[in-house]
């Protein structure tokens, strides 16, 4: 386990995730991390540390289980569209999720806020430790896991029925985190 503590992690999570976004963590219980990721996406597990999650549907309601969950139809084979991405790329993607269509240029006052937002992303991912692996459905990572995710080419390989969805999967030996955004129109 890492040294990040609940209060700073929670503050950073709130700074990055809001309406129409999904951020949740679950325990690793399977050899295949994809099964644990699926449990987290479908809200079939609680945070092993009891820390908060952010699962706000567009319009401000909570995502739930069953048909109200955007990941209800995800299957383990869908993770074939999850490409390895560097830690820096994962941090950049988490910030990008705040922008319309996941474009960093669409984040208000990004030039003045970039350092602070990247710091928040670093705190969130620090929970998973130095040996964590990161994955994304952003196709730019398919050919280059070290691509600059702020200035990327390509699209997202969608996991849901939304017009567009994009995110980061963080995998450590103990936990799996899902950090996702959705475009509904």
Image (spheres, helix red, strand yellow):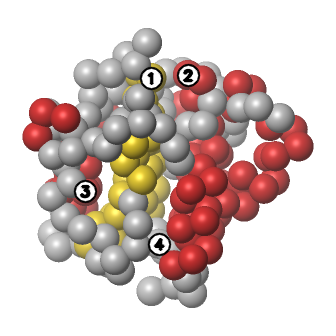
Q: Is residue 116 above or below residue 181?
A: below
Q: Nearer the viewer, residue 60 or 165?
A: 60
Q: Is residue 32 above or below residue 104?
A: below
According to the picture, the residue beneath numbered tag 2 turns out to be 101
Comes first in the chain, label 4 or label 1: 4
- Lower position in the chain sequence, tag 1 or tag 3: 3
User: Which quarter of the picture shows residue 35?
Assistant: bottom left
Q: Nearer the viewer, mark 2 or mark 4?
A: 2
N-terminal of the pair, mark 2 or mark 4, is 2
Q: Residue at x 63, y 30 (%)?
A: 99
Residue drawn 61% across the image and 62% down it: 12
The image quadrant where one finds the N terminus is: bottom left
Of pointers 4 and 3, the one earlier in the residue sequence: 3
Q: Is residue 129 left or right of residue 46?
A: right
Q: CA distance from mark 2 to mark 4?
A: 27 Å
Q: Is residue 24 left or right of residue 18?
A: left
- Discs 2, 1 touching: Cβ within 8 Å: yes
Residue 40 disc label: 3
The residue that label 1 is drawn on is 183
Looking at the image, is mark 3 or mark 2 earlier in the sequence?
A: 3
**Label 2 environment density (alpha carbons within 10 Å; few <14, some 14–19, many ≥20):** some
Q: Residue at x 58, y 42 (%)?
A: 93
Q: Position of residue 39 (x, y in %)?
A: 18, 56
* 67 or 25, nearer to the observer: 67
Query: Is residue 37 visible in the rendered structure shown here?
Result: yes
């Amino acid at each position: 386990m890492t040294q990040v503590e609940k209060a700073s992690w929670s503050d950073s999570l709130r700074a990055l995730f809001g309406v129409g976004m999904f951020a949740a963590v679950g325990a690793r219980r399977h050899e295949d991390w994809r099964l644990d990721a699926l449990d987290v996406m479908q809200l079939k597990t609680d945070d092993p540390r009891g820390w908060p999650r952010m699962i706000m549907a567009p319009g401000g309601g909570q995502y739930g289980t069953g048909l109200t969950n955007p990941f209800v139809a995800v299957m383990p084979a869908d993770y074939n569209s999850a490409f390895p991405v560097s830690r820096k790329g994962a941090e950049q993607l988490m910030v990008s999720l705040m922008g319309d269509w996941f474009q960093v240029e669409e984040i208000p006052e990004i030039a003045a806020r970039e350092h602070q937002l990247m710091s928040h992303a670093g705190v969130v991912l620090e929970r998973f430790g130095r040996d964590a692996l990161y994955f994304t459905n952003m196709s730019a990572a398919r050919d280059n896991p070290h691509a600059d995710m702020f200035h990327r080419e390509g699209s997202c390989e969608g996991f849901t029925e939304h017009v567009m969805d994009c995110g980061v999967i963080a995998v450590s030996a103990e936990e799996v985190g899902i950090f996702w955004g959705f475009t509904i129109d």
